[in-house]
Amino acid sequence: MRDVAKQANVSIGTASRVINGAPNVEAAYRTRVLAAIKTLGFVPNRAAQEVRKGRSREIGIIVRDITTPVLASFVRAAQDLFEEAGYGLLICSSDNRKDRELELLRRFRQRRIEGLITTTSSEVDTDLAQARNDLDFPVLMFDREVDGAHDIVQVDHASGVNQAVTYLLSLGHRRILLSTGPLNIYPARARVEGYKRAFAAQRLDVDPALVRTAGFDAATGFRETAVALERANRPSAIIAGGIDMLPGVLKAIRATHLHVPRDISVIGGADSDLALLAEPAISVLRWNFTEIGATCARMLLERIEAADTEPRRLAFAPELVVRDSCAAVVIAPAQKRESRQK
Amino acid sequence: MRDVAKQANVSIGTASRVINGAPNVEAAYRTRVLAAIKTLGFVPNRAAQEVRKGRSREIGIIVRDITTPVLASFVRAAQDLFEEAGYGLLICSSDNRKDRELELLRRFRQRRIEGLITTTSSEVDTDLAQARNDLDFPVLMFDREVDGAHDIVQVDHASGVNQAVTYLLSLGHRRILLSTGPLNIYPARARVEGYKRAFAAQRLDVDPALVRTAGFDAATGFRETAVALERANRPSAIIAGGIDMLPGVLKAIRATHLHVPRDISVIGGADSDLALLAEPAISVLRWNFTEIGATCARMLLERIEAADTEPRRLAFAPELVVRDSCAAVVIAPAQKRESRQK
DNA sequence: TTGAAAGCGCTAACAA
DNA sequence: TTGTTAGCGCTTTCAA
């Protein structure tokens, strides 16, 4: 910058003013500085600006895995709003691992970000809670249920799974496998709750063996489905209780040579090309991740403006998209034969 | 940091030495400083460190769309190596848009990153070439063909499509649609070249109407496929000449109620859950994105160490994974009937 | 081994 | 409107 100032024959202060678009610079000076910037190829040092200005104008976001398409659309929507508001977005995947999550929180503190949208790998872990509470920027917690003065935005998974189970029960299914994640995080708890609520509403008992909480990922979906399908008394329907479990569930079904929906009905935990293009097309629980991402961004920006208003909390309800992956069960609960829907 | 030094009753210099793990600090001082850091919850300001040290220890990476799973595994592999080497990774999607790409390059310059892995939306655009050459850190160009002193890592798409076409020709196909991106970037050119080479090897003529270069994305795949299938003289096989075109191609086929592979054979441009789980499973061109990502990272790290060795160039060959989406054509070229494979 | 002090690149307060 | 200068938080040289 000194070189720019020298080249333009102005003081370094004037150069700075031009760079920052200050209004009180004479046109002649401005053009000279601009010319110097161009010929020297000067680009301001962001780190130095941050140090001096005392703020980073960066937002952080931690998702489990940015690879998951629905999460990517969530992030994308948020990013658009942040950029518009003049904030950059630092996007990281935690892989649902505590150590990585802690490391990311540490890095974000080093970076002096001004706000964070995050999930967490465990709602009850005290190290994580501690680390979050030590942050001196606002945190918006996404799809988790934690103590602390955070804004919270959730998907109402209880409602979603409730819809799915109610639908399956209406088709005559009684042995419905719900494969979801560990109960130390909200989405799993909520799904289980929705599952039980739907059974209770029909005064039916839940078979605890059919509520599996081993994990959210595709590999677990595969394992859980494979194990369940091998049992003598196998389920007649499966609900993938996670955003990217469907591939694993379908692979396991494929491996057993069972036919969807004749032998087994399936409901996916999120929409995807796979769900749409599978044969038959898979019914799914769907919600608008773009809208949710935008809402999170908006709430966090408002929080940054007004630090000490009351924490807010918001839930979005999923919608059951019925396609062709669920058939009616004709024979009673412990059935051997089933018939096709339609 | 002043507070830490004060609290520990040492000079700010000693505090800095402890933070940076300098060896020449007496144990007693070290523990005092560490204690102070803990009680005060001090985390060093990364921006200030960067300013003072004069280096960022950050690498940038620009991909078209991080959402694409194979690209995500590419990035992930690279990230692991960079982190191990002490570098952070700034990951950005260009959306294949020139303006966004230029903006990202500008931001990376502001950030003083020390190396960049990038693709580009156009190999011939002079603004982009100019912007790249103005960078004062090494650039590794991924899957593109550009002038300039960059290391280049490519996928040998010509070989891949050549394998695919040769395979289809051997099944009796003559009207093979290749839907790929614009010819101003290497992956499209290479695919077209591989296509022509395979036809030439059999002394067959290429119908230029079957080589489509409208775009890489799923939406274009849909449109191109839909249009082609509506023509009287429709193709008997389709090659998706892009990494994430398969969903669009399959959707279009689905919409026409044609049957794969009986009515139309399909080869996907990259592997995916969709390709594996579609009914029938889709044959694809596959390459090891994890290995390629790691290789890119390694090359860039070496380049950072040794700035002025000769630029290097590397190509990885795809493999044709044969599944169930291609059938043999029984009747001669302008056929009306086809028969199933197997 | 330690503390004092200079200075990284920049912004902003101040005086002119 | 401009130039001068202090200083953001940190590292690193230098002298002790």
Image (tube, coloured by chain):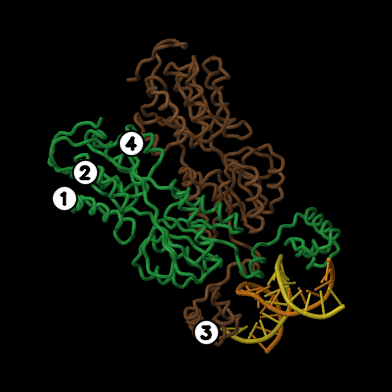
Chain colours: A brown, B green, C orange, D yellow
Label 1 vs label 3, nearer the camera: 1
Q: CA distance from mark 2 to mark 3?
A: 68 Å
Asked which secondary structure carries label 4, the reply is loop
> In the rendered view, does B206 fall on the left or right side of B77?
left
Q: CA distance from mark 1 to mark 3?
A: 67 Å
Crowdedness near tag 1: few (<14), some (14–19) or many (≥20) residues, C-alpha within 10 Å: few
Provide residue A249's location: percent of width, then percent of height: 46, 30
**Residue denoted by label 1:** B204
**Residue denoted by label 4:** B323
Provide residue A22's location: percent of width, then percent of height: 56, 75
Q: CA distance from mark 3 to mark 4?
A: 68 Å
Disc 3 residue type (three-letter) = Tyr
Q: CA distance from mark 4 to mark 2?
A: 16 Å
| Quarter where residue B3 is shown | bottom right
Compared with A305, B111 (above or below) is below
**Residue denoted by label 2:** B169
**Residue denoted by label 3:** A29
Provide residue B241's location: percent of width, then percent of height: 31, 49
Asked which secondary structure carries label 2, the reply is helix
Crowdedness near tag 4: few (<14), some (14–19) or many (≥20) residues, C-alpha within 10 Å: some
